[in-house]
Amino acid sequence: MAMRVSIMESHGGSKRPSPSRVRVSVRLRPYMEKDEDKTCVRGLDSQSLEIVNWRNQLETMQYQFDAFYGDKATQREIYTGSVYAILPHLLVGQNASVFAYGPTGAGKTHTMLGNPNQPGIIPRAVRDLLQMTRGTNGQPEEENWSYAITMSYVEIYQEKVMDLLEPKNKDLPIREDKDHNILIPGVTQKTINTFSDFDEHFIPASQNRTVACTKLNDRSSRSHAVLLIKVQKNQQVSPFRQLTGKLYLIDLAGSEDNRRTGNQGIRLKESGAINSSLFTLSKVVDALNQGLPRIPYRDSKLTRLLQDSLGGSAHSVMIANIAPEQKYYFDTLTALNFAAKSKQIINKPFSQETTQAPVLPTLKRHRDDVESSAPSR
Ligand code: ADP
Ligand code: MG
């Protein structure tokens, strides 16, 4: 990968740039089950982790990513390490996208949204973009240019695009203009001048994500929440140039295997549609990262919407959220296999970071755990 980037750079801007890679970070959330300490995954360094190999307890599987954040990582570390650097590109008319991927319960919403005490990527990025375009004295940093920031917020549910700012219960169309910009004609756009403008629109809209309870998860975990922040830069003097940069901040549907949730009928159909959208996203990311000639953007609503903001000249970051508990084991493996740059099987048993116990009893306990959960696939 590094080689492809350097070749691209050595040609300067003269050649058509090869589509840019999607950077992948993995975030492991803290252990949350009260009873016993039975984690099956742990970090090794700032780029890699290891997980039990359920096929062979004498081995662990080690995965490498662009970045790995362990269970002690703060919201600020994730943001500064994986997101902040893409913001300046928006001010020069380039596009970007940030995704939270992973099974329900692994920390996607915490990572994107967070809470008032631990704000996530969305509030931090919006605050910084406002500051970058307003400067410190409320004026743009650059003379003769002004900025306008707008937001739109949609949900993709059962391959339908629904407006969350002004819900109309209508599937919005996705179009492409002659310059290959992707747009949603008719979607609500709100201007945001201050952070409280943003909050005022965003908070009620988040509550518009309807809830339909099922055994494992609700609608909000089965739909993709897509926040678009558009930064428009207008030259105030001739030739009145206009640059538009788009930032997509996306809380994806849960990546869990819905065949295990006991879903039936309509629920099963929902799951199928969501899975096909996530499936297409994974094909698109794969194709981009392998440098394949054809990228299957048109195969789902989500990827079609992101066509101008994922790959190409856009800057994209995928944050794969994983949970350490045993019950997430197979969903974690799925997420890791999707996200990994490389995987290696190491001939050594998985060992607990924190336990003082001798290796053998620890190993035996894990063998029991994994064997009892493994035959379900
Ligand atoms: P998802 O959106 O992937 O379903 P959530 O973000 O809702 O998952 O996280 C599930 C639960 O775990 C929530 O209660 C959340 O507050 C908590 N959580 C997730 N990640 C962390 C973290 N890094 N630190 C502390 N709590 C977390
Ligand atoms: Mg969530």
Image: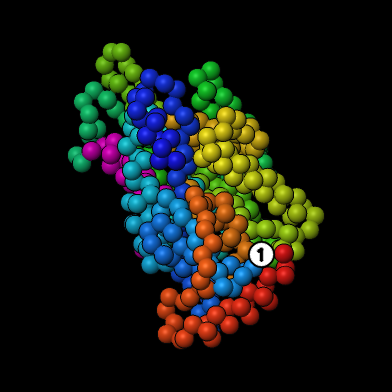
Magenta region, residue range: 116-135
- For this view, does 66 lie left or right of residue 346? left
Whole-percent x, y for residue 179 in the image? 50, 19
- Magenta stretch contains residue 120: yes
Q: Secondary structure at mark 1?
A: loop
**Residue 264 position by quadrant:** bottom right
Residue tagged 1: 216
**Residue 229 position by quadrant:** top left
- Magenta stretch contains residue 48: no
Label the magenta part by its dominant secondary structure: helix
Residue sitting at x 53%, y 28%:
182
Quarter of the rendering occupied by the C terminus: bottom right
Whole-percent x, y for residue 330 in the image? 62, 63
- Specify few, some or many for label 1: CA neighbours under 10 Å numbering under 14, 14-19, or 20 or more: some
- The kind of residue on which mark 1 rests is Leu
- For this view, does 371 lie left or right of residue 58? right
The answer to whether 182 is drawn above or below residue 335 in the figure is above
